[in-house]
Image (tube, grey):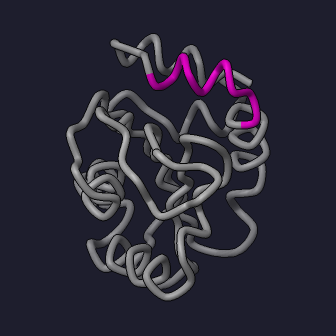
């Protein structure tokens, strides 16, 4: 994995084949490791859901991938990223990109510190074959290897 991304997506921040049922549950499942390790407060998860309810599924960027995030605020304590694969995939309301089988939760304390990691993520999720392999990953090691740009 490229430098910053490798440091951010640690083994304890990966969840595989989570049964979510709804997009809100999928976002919560992806964010749970960040709440658990103190990177974010639960209020940040609420902010992600509230923004999606207000603006639509703006963070479903490509087929099957949601990059769940909200504006930086006091509920984000440090730059952090987590990844959850969702089985079965769920609808987020994105006409072009549903259903979603991979949710990446991005927590940034400001507008700039996440840009290097975001560039790496964009390169990865821009490859449909890699996204399909991420969705099918059965081990944390397998998923981490697929996050190498």
Query: Which quarter shows the C terminus?
Result: top right
- Relative horizontal placement of residue 15, taking residue 67 as reference (left or right): left
Quadrant for residue 59, please give it: bottom right
> 148 and 132: which one is in front?
132
> 112 and 68: which one is in front?
68
Residue drawn 56% across the image and 72% down it: 109
Which residue, as the protein is rendered here, is positioned at the far bottom? Answer: 54
Vertical relation: 20 (above or below) 68: above
- Relative horizontal placement of residue 137, taking residue 12 as reference (left or right): right
Residue drawn 43% across the image and 69% down it: 77
Query: Which quarter shows the N terminus?
Result: top right
Q: Is residue 9 shown in magenta?
A: no
Q: How many marks?
A: 0
Which residue, as the protein is rendered here, is positioned at the far front? Answer: 95
Q: Position of residue 143 (x, y in %)?
A: 47, 19
Vertical relation: 94 (above or below) 111: above
Q: Position of residue 133 (x, y in %)?
A: 54, 16
Quadrant for residue 11, please give it: top left
- Relative horizontal placement of residue 23, taking residue 122 as reference (left or right): left
Residue drawn 34% across the image and 13% down it: 138
Residue drawn 71% across the image and 74% down it: 111
Task: Specify the principal SS of the magenta part.
Answer: helix
Q: Position of residue 132 (x, y in %)?
A: 56, 22
Quadrant for residue 18, please give it: top left
Q: Is residue 132 shown in magenta?
A: yes
- Relative horizontal placement of residue 17, taking residue 130 as reference (left or right): left
Which portion, as a residue range, is magenta? 126-135
Q: Position of residue 54 (x, y in %)?
A: 49, 88
């Amino acid at each position: 994995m490229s430098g910053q991304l490798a440091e951010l997506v640690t083994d304890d921040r990966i969840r595989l084949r989570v049964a979510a049922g709804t997009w809100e549950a999928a976002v919560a499942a992806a964010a749970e490791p960040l709440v658990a390790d103190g990177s974010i407060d639960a209020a940040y998860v609420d902010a992600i859901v509230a923004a999606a309810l207000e603006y639509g599924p703006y963070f479903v960027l490509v087929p099957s991938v949601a990059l769940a995030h909200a504006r930086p605020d006091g509920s984000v304590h440090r730059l952090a990223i987590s990844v959850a694969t969702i089985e079965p995939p769920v609808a987020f309301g994105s006409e072009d990109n549903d259903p979603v089988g991979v949710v990446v939760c991005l927590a940034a304390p400001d507008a700039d510190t996440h840009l290097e990691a975001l560039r790496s993520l964009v390169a990865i999720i821009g490859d449909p074959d890699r996204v399909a392999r991420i969705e099918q990953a059965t081990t944390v090691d397998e998923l981490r290897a697929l996050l190498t740009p």
